[in-house]
Image (spheres, helix red, strand yellow):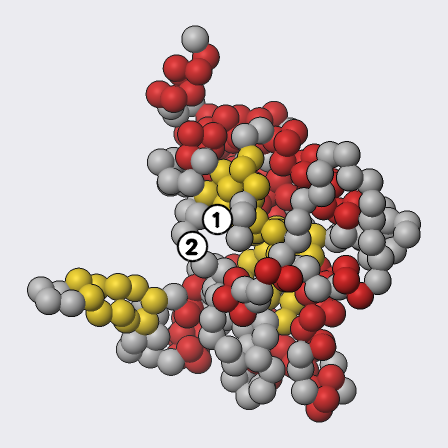
Amino acid sequence: MKMQEITCLSQYLETIEKLQSAYSVGLVNNPTSKVFLYRGMCNKDYSLIPKVFLKQQDNTEDRIIENQTYLAWAKERDLLKSFIHEACCYIAIPPTDIRHWAEHAQHHGVPTRFLDWSSNPLTALYFSCRDKATTDGVVWLLHQRNYSYVFWRNIALASKAKKREEILSELLNQESDVEFPMLYTPYYVDSRMSAQGSYFLVWGTRIEPLEKLFENDSYYMKCPKIDDEVRSYGTEQQQPILYKFLIHADRKQKLLRELDMVGINEKALFPGLDGIGRYIERKYRFNYNEAVESF
């Protein structure tokens, strides 16, 4: 799949606007709806898969061994139970309320079957540039309505009759036969989730990266040409769900400066003293490539 290279903020937003126009769901765009969701990652080689399912490769003298990063010694439920056990004195939630405990666990860094997305393209771009200054980053774009269409089209009839909350509970309790990740809006348990416009994909029974679950080219959007004003409507619009932006390492610092100019920075996305401290540290940090460009 070809990635769209991004060199500046205006190009990024213009491309999203073109995609939104080309892949809208009707003759008239609803200005109040969020067509796309976004996920930024600081390394272009990272996969779209929840943290709890990550694997690592360990080198021995004669071979490479692949191990589960978090599930080698414990089950998925054990991680959440450990968090509930340790955190129950701080959070007034019944131990049986798995959904809200899982949301808190994800928010505080516990590996879960949730994958974070944002409704704000600038937030995702920030996270693609924030770390690993010498590594290319990416922003993934997910067509929210098309994904919901593909999801419901591919689940069993019995599951279609269930409410979204019921399916979510079964997925978290590992009692569901739903194969594909389900998209939903979590409760914003603190100001950080609200500031970042958080959405979650909760994984089903097929433990594969999202880009592997939907690797056929028909699932990927294509950016229209500048002079292409032709728009199509109907079922052909309901298949494409993904798009990928590439951010080269040498563009990261420049993009972070541009994002800071429009108020997207550490103190905005992480409200509180820690966010302010990290914002000041990053603002005054010397970057050689940036200094060279300024001459």
Count the marks: how many?
Answer: 2
Relative to residue 78, is residue 199 depicted above or below?
above
Residue 133 quadrant: top left
Q: Measuring 80% from the left and 66% from the top, which residue is drawn there?
A: 235
Q: Is mark 1 on a helix, strand or loop?
A: strand
Residue 57 quadrant: bottom left
Q: Measuring 35% from the left and 21% from the top, which residue is drawn there?
A: 288
Q: Measuring 72% from the left and 89% from the top, which residue is drawn there?
A: 157
Quadrant of the image containing the C terminus: top left
Distance between mark 1 and mark 2 Cα atoms? 7 Å
Q: Which amino acid does label 2 sit on?
A: Tyr
- Residue 262 x %, y %: 64, 29
Relative to residue 180, is residue 126 depicted above or below?
above
- Residue 285 x %, y %: 39, 25
- Mark 1 near mark 2, Cβ–Cβ under 8 Å? yes
Residue beneath disc 1: 41
Residue beneath disc 2: 46
Q: Which residue lies furthest to the top in this view?
A: 295
Q: Nearer the viewer, residue 71 or 133?
A: 133
Residue 154 quadrant: bottom right
**Any part of residue 271 in sight:** no
